[in-house]
Amino acid sequence: MPVTSIALLILGVLAALALTVWALSAWGVAAVVTVLLCLALAARWAMAPIGHDDSHP
């Protein structure tokens, strides 16, 4: 993995952490946990494997 990719990954994680801390202080725990759960479920759905389609001959 190139150094640029690692640096961007670390920067992205730090930005997400800062955004989460800001959202917690602005909106409270209940709203932020709900949004984070929705994002996690959407990411899980988006990364789910797609089954092979054998219905066509």
Image: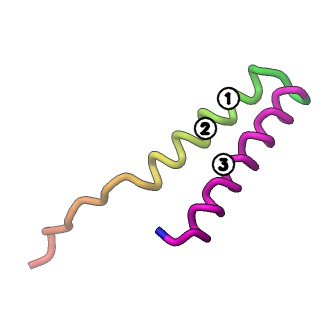
Q: Residues within 10 Å of mark 1 (few under 14, many from 20)?
A: few
Q: Position of residue 16 (x, y in %)?
A: 72, 46
Which of the numbered marks, if any, corresponds to residue 52? none
At x 82%, y 28%, the residue is 24
| Residue bounds of the magenta highlight | 2-25
User: Label 2 belongs to which residue?
Assistant: 38
With respect to residue 3, does 15 lie above or below?
above
At x 20%, y 67%, the residue is 53
With respect to residue 37, does 51 lie above or below?
below
User: Label 1 belongs to which residue?
Assistant: 34
Disc 3 secondary structure class? helix
The three-letter code of the residue at mark 1 reads Thr
At x 54%, y 46%, the residue is 42
Q: Nearer the viewer, mark 3 or mark 2?
A: 3
Q: Residues within 10 Å of mark 2 (few under 14, many from 20)?
A: few
Disc 2 secondary structure class? helix
At x 31%, y 56%, the residue is 49
Disc 1 secondary structure class? helix
The three-letter code of the residue at mark 3 reads Val
Q: Position of residue 1 (x, y in %)?
A: 46, 68
Asked whether the residues under the numbered discs 1 and 2 touch, taking CB atoms below 8 Å apart as contact, a structural biologist would say yes
Q: Of the two numbered discs 3 and 2 on the same chain, state the one appearing first in sequence.
A: 3
